[in-house]
Amino acid sequence: MTAFKELRLLPWTGPDGKPCFLSTDDNDSHMSRLADNMESVQLGMATDLLDQAVEILADAEVSPDDLRALAKDLTGALRDTLRVATSRGRRLDSRSTDHPFR
């Protein structure tokens, strides 16, 4: 069985909201590439949302409803970004353990 630290945390959750993991030695597998692409999309969307947030917050007449919507969107983007960072951090940790001179 693959050790927990060797499992890749995927950038999406299951239908019940629990994390999904991938067990593979092939970083170029279909699922690995799909996860890489999804991470890129999520990070790109977070970047775009940050730009929108700067504009919205600069507007002195922004409505409370618009601020709530922004907070909801930023919360989702932060959740996705943290999941990507956690996944990538685990993979870096496992590589440094396997190859101490990298």
Image (cartoon, rainbow, N blue to C red):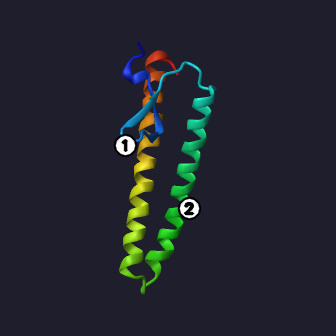
On the image, numbered disc 1 is attached to which residue? 17
> What's the amino acid at mark 1?
Gly
Which quarter of the image is occupied by the N terminus? top left
Q: Which residue lies at the image location 53% right of the left edge and 21% below the top edge?
A: 24
Tell which tag, 1 or 2, sits nearer the viewer: 1
Which element is circle 1 on?
loop
Reading the image, the residue beneath label 2 is 48
Q: What element carries label 2?
A: helix
Q: Are marks 1 and 2 in contact (CB under 8 Å)?
A: no
In this view of the protein, which residue sits in the foreground, 13 or 48?
A: 13
Earlier residue among tags 1 and 2 = 1
* Residue displayed at 48% across by 71% down: 54
Above or below: residue 21 compared with residue 59: above
Q: Residue furthest front?
A: 15
Q: Looking at the image, how many numbered discs can be counted on the residues?
A: 2
Determine crowd level at label 1: few under 14, some 14-19, many 20+ residues with C-alpha closer than 10 A.
few
Image height of 94 relative to 43, above or below: above
Q: Which mark is residue 64?
A: none
Q: Within the image, what quadrant is residue 27 found in?
A: top right
Q: What residue type is labelled 2?
A: Asp
**Residue 61 horizontal/vertical position (percent):** 42, 87
Q: Position of residue 72 (x, y in %)?
A: 39, 63
Residue 13 image point, x, y percent: 42, 41
Q: How far is the residue under mark 1 from the one under mark 2? A: 25 Å
Residue drawn at x 55%, y 56% is 45
Q: Eyeballing the image, is 41 above or below 1?
A: below
90 or 17: nearer the eye? 17
Q: Could you tell me residue 79's position as x and y percent? A: 40, 50
